Image: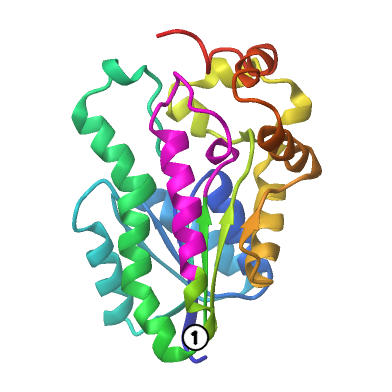
Amino acid sequence: MKNSYALVTGATSGIGLEISRDLAKRGYNLILVSRTTEKLDQTSKELIKKFNIKCDYFSSDLTEVNAPDKIYDFTKSNKYNIDILINNAGYALPNAFHENSMEDEEKCLRILGISVIALTKKYINDMISNGSGKIMIVSSVAAFAPASSLQSLYGPVKTFMNRFSESLGFYNKYGITSTAVCPGYTVTNFHTASGVQKEMDSVPSFLKKSARRIAEEGVDAMLKGKKVCVPTKTWKIVVFLLKVIPHSVFPLISGLLAPGRYNDV
């Protein structure tokens, strides 16, 4: 399709940056979205120079209520056809639920959940009109795990996002597919930014995977129209065990491999 683009939120760091690079390597034009204009400009220039694609960007803070509207209006005013939507922007809180402000909890819900729904709602009508579209929602293995004392909203919202992505399967008849990508522990700056780097440092190295590998497997799954992707064999095994091991036992295992998530508040 003429002037066809993939739009990536959280595009200048971690998994989002690697997804942007992977899509560019495959020849897709890109619209990058994140909060920092300087990083957006730097990343855009890198991708244009290295992969000879078209790339534009839009600075947006997805904690703001009208952010999805502004992103959509930007792409429409520039006549960019978005046929791939990557909902990747992340957010997490380091403290126990009772210690976080309601304002921060709302920001978490808006970035991880409401903005995903809003952007998908904006672009899915265009995809229906075009007769095709690919949607990726970057979720987490936390969607399959028991609730934890650390980041108490994170896992439940990711579970919700998996179900939301699954519900988009009803649009398959319009040529639209949605893929929930569920990585485990991934080496990025997310944990430092979220205040949980100490917990990440205690995780065994065999459980930590590179953002590039997550991105490659995630993009492959999305382009193939898979409903759910758990990148790497290690984390596929973990998810299988999460489904068969009693939830009462899991905190004991997690306490050995990833201390802190199931401590008493």
Image coords of residue 72 (percent x, y): 29, 71
Image coords of residue 67 (percent x, y): 24, 58
Q: How many residues crowd mark 1 within 10 Å: few (<14), some (14–19), many (20+)? A: some
Q: Is residue 146 left or right of residue 37?
A: right
Identify the image quadrant of residue 229.
bottom right
Which region of the structure is painted magenta? 139-168
Kind of residue at disc 1: Tyr
Residue placed at 56% from the left, 56% from the top? 180
Q: Work out whether residue 30 can be spotted.
A: no
Image coords of residue 130 (percent x, y): 45, 90
Q: Residue furthest top?
A: 264
Q: Is residue 32 left or right of residue 253?
A: left
Please identify the dominant SS of the magenta region: helix
Q: Is residue 65 above or below residue 187?
A: below
Residue placed at 54% from the left, 28% from the top? 146
Q: Which residue is mark 1?
A: 174
Report the quarter where the C terminus lies: top left
| 155 falls in the magenta region | yes
Q: Is residue 141 above or below residue 17?
A: above
Q: Is residue 101 left or right of residue 191?
A: left
Task: Give the camera-side residue of 234 and 147.
Answer: 147
